[in-house]
Image (cartoon, helix red, strand yellow):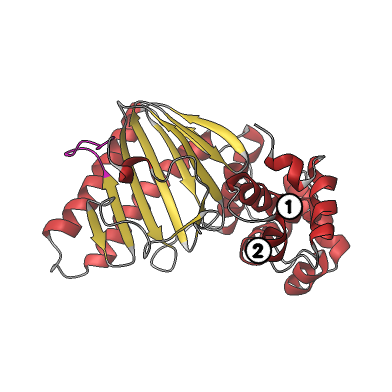
Amino acid sequence: MRNPYIVLNLKTHPEQARVATLGNSLILNDNFEKEIRWNHAEATDFMNYPIKLSSTMILFFCLEGEVHLFQNMQECRMKKNDVTFMKSGLFGEVKYISRDIKFVVILINEEFYFPIFNKYDMSILQKNLLINPICSLPTYRINECITLYKMIKDRINNHSEDMFQEEVIKGYLQTLIFNVYSQIKMSLNPHYEKQTKLTRQQNFFNRFMELLQENYVQERQINYYANKLCITPRYLSRIIHSISGHFAGDHINLFVISEAKQLLRSKKLTILQISEMLNFSSQSLFGRYFKKYTGYSPKEYQNID
């Protein structure tokens, strides 16, 4: 039986979908020199199928054409010069790709490299990516990003024996990602732009989101996360609400419900199997939980067109 969703990491990424590879640390793909073989399964097999990132970040640039995504439980449309930045632990799904698509994809192992943001910037980035996964880049900025991408690609394919190869590539990546992030930050409400320091509350928010992405299947109690952060559950929930507008429990439920919806939509597992995967003690408990937060029973949700 096929899995209910694709778990994507650099080890499982298909060989044909790459133009440059740095071991299990970095994969690049584009269609600058090759045409997409639309009549082959490899070009469309992944479409309309949930994808969950595992220890992997993705930068996806749409240079021409259009891509429709279902990301963070939102319908998103990418057009020319748009970019999306997806972090490990989140779901995505490709719904449509236009035949005139030109694209760049960068897959990064988080153990190899993670953007060196200060903690204030990281908390803003995490919050914004959940709300607005797509960012439009001006032409000069997209051109700079693609130039950096080509430099990384050339480094991997033509200069593999150079000294400090990984360090140089990380430097290029850092510049590229900061280029994208600077545009994301410019698009934020000016209220956030005026803040320059990470407050104690923002630090807790950032750490909470990291813990949540790693543990939401096994741990749905606020007490678990509060204990990890050495604060009370009430204080944690108040902090998270002040930063994001939602309480800690809302974030936990959002992650659990998002995965449940993806599993139910795939129709590859029974409701009992899904409840067990999500660590519910019984199918009936899962059903009550799901209906409480969606208004539908799991079976009703599966049958929605």
Q: Position of residue 301 (x, y in %)?
A: 72, 41
Q: Residues within 10 Å of mark 1 (few under 14, many from 20)?
A: many
Q: What residue type is disc 2 on?
A: Arg
Q: Is residue 35 magenta?
A: yes
Q: Position of residue 218 (x, y in %)?
A: 70, 69
Instruction: Name the residue located 78 percent from the left edge and 71 percent from the top edge.
Output: 224
- Residue 32 lies, with reference to residue 200, above or below; the image says above
Q: Which of the two labelled residues, at mark 1 and mark 2, occupies the earlier sequence position?
A: 2
Q: Is residue 60 visible?
A: yes
Question: Which range is magenta?
Answer: 30-38
* Residue at left offset 24%, top offset 37%: 37
Mark 1 or 2: in front is 1
| Apparent side of residue 21 relative to residue 193 in the rendered image (left or right) | left
* Residue, disc 2: 207
Q: Residue at x 82, y 46 (%)?
A: 291
Report the residue at 52% width, 45% height from top.
92
- Residue at the far right: name it: 234
Quick one: 285 or 108, which is closer to the camera? 285
**Inter-mark Cα distance, 1 to 2:** 13 Å
> Magenta region's main secondary structure?
loop
SS at circle 1 = helix
What residue is disc 1 on?
251
Q: Is residue 188 left or right of residue 223?
A: left
Residue 221 position by quadrant: bottom right
